[in-house]
Amino acid sequence: MIYPTPAGPRYSRLRRFALDIAITQVFNLIIAILITYVVRRHGGFFVNLVFSMCIGTLATAFIDGGRLIMWGEQKPPKWKFVLLIIVSLPAAQFLGKALAAFMLGIPFEDMSEMRGGNATAMLIGAAVCSMFIIWFFWSREHIEYLRAEAEAEKARAASIEKQALQAQLQMLQAQIEPHMLFNTLANLKGLIDVDPRLAHRMLDQLIHYLRATLCASRSQITTLEQEFSLLESYLGLMKVRMGQRLSYALELPDHLRHLSVPPMLLQPLVENAIKHGLEPRVEGGKITVRAERNGTRLTLTVCDTGLGLENAPPSTGTGVGVSNVRERLQALYGAGAEFTLNPNTPSGVIAELAIPL
């Protein structure tokens, strides 16, 4: 598989052809030097250079131009390519001599006689040049083919890695603590007979929350506005459950509302704060969720006034929420993200995460 340049396949072919012609001129210069000073052909260096330039350039034009026209930048079939070279070399030899004679003002019959001496040396030189040209073009095409294969394999490996990462993230999203739903349904069942009006209100909040959660769980990216809207639905539901024991504040500046973030990134932290901080506390408390921009990083904070890390019951631990956030941040940003848990004053926990914008 060949990856064309952004300017398009045609531009890539022309640039490749121009580069091959330029490389050929270096070989033509070397051949002219060898003919003049090693084979010691008559006519002088300039004459030999003109002949070498004409023959070599036409040979490259026929071979490389024909290859690009017929097969593009893909690897050509071996025997068809060799056949192209076999046909192109004699044609380039004849036409190149004629062109050089014309440019130098030498009659064609005189040119043939002038360059007909030392036929054995010329034959050996032509054979060596032909073998070199065949080796050069074929080796280069083989290297280009192997390079393209390596790039394709690298792309396939990156695609597999990306799919594995997406599967990991979806699995982590699916692990978001489900106990809240079961507890809410249990409370709803108890409220139906005791307070039908409150049960109806809780059911409305639950439907709104589940609808928002379903949309978020199916997305790979969301905005802070949508994330905070999901948190508002969840906290509204918890407010119906806990009543005056729960208060909350969501602080999202207008200039950050449309910023893209991973979905349900804050949800586990808010659930964790309620489950381990506010629910076990008799008087409840307050949760504050805040978004701030610090240079090139986005800081998200979940602050609660619950029991705190030291006073939380040993059996509750930190649950799935904190580990879920850590694993998702590691999968998405690696060392580019930070996550900290610190005590709040006078009580509670401050969970803070910073991610690159």
Image: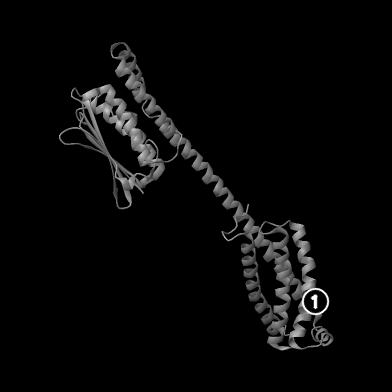
Q: Residue 277 falls in which quadrant of the image?
A: top left
Work out whether 111 lies above or below 24.
below
Identify the residue under disc 1: 94
Query: Which residue lies at the image location 46% right of the left edge and 39% below the top edge?
Result: 165
Residue 293: give x, y in percent of width and height: 30, 48
Side of 320 where 346 appears, left or right: left
Element marked by disc 1: helix
Judge whether residue 99 can be spotted in this image.
Answer: yes
Residues 325 and 208: in front is 208
Q: Residues within 10 Å of mark 1 (few under 14, many from 20)?
A: few
Side of 1 where 54 appears, left or right: right
Residue at the top extreme, as displayed: 193
Work out whether 189 lies above or below 236.
above
Query: Which residue lies at the image location 79% right of the left edge and 81% below the top edge?
Result: 98
Q: Residue 187 falls in which quadrant of the image?
A: top left
Q: Residue 287 falls in which quadrant of the image?
A: top left
Residues 225 and 13: in front is 225
Work out whether 288 lies above or below 11.
above
Judge whether residue 323 can be spotted in this image.
Answer: no
Residue 95: give x, y in percent of width and height: 78, 76
Q: Which amino acid does label 1 sit on?
A: Phe
Residue 283: give x, y in percent of width and height: 18, 24
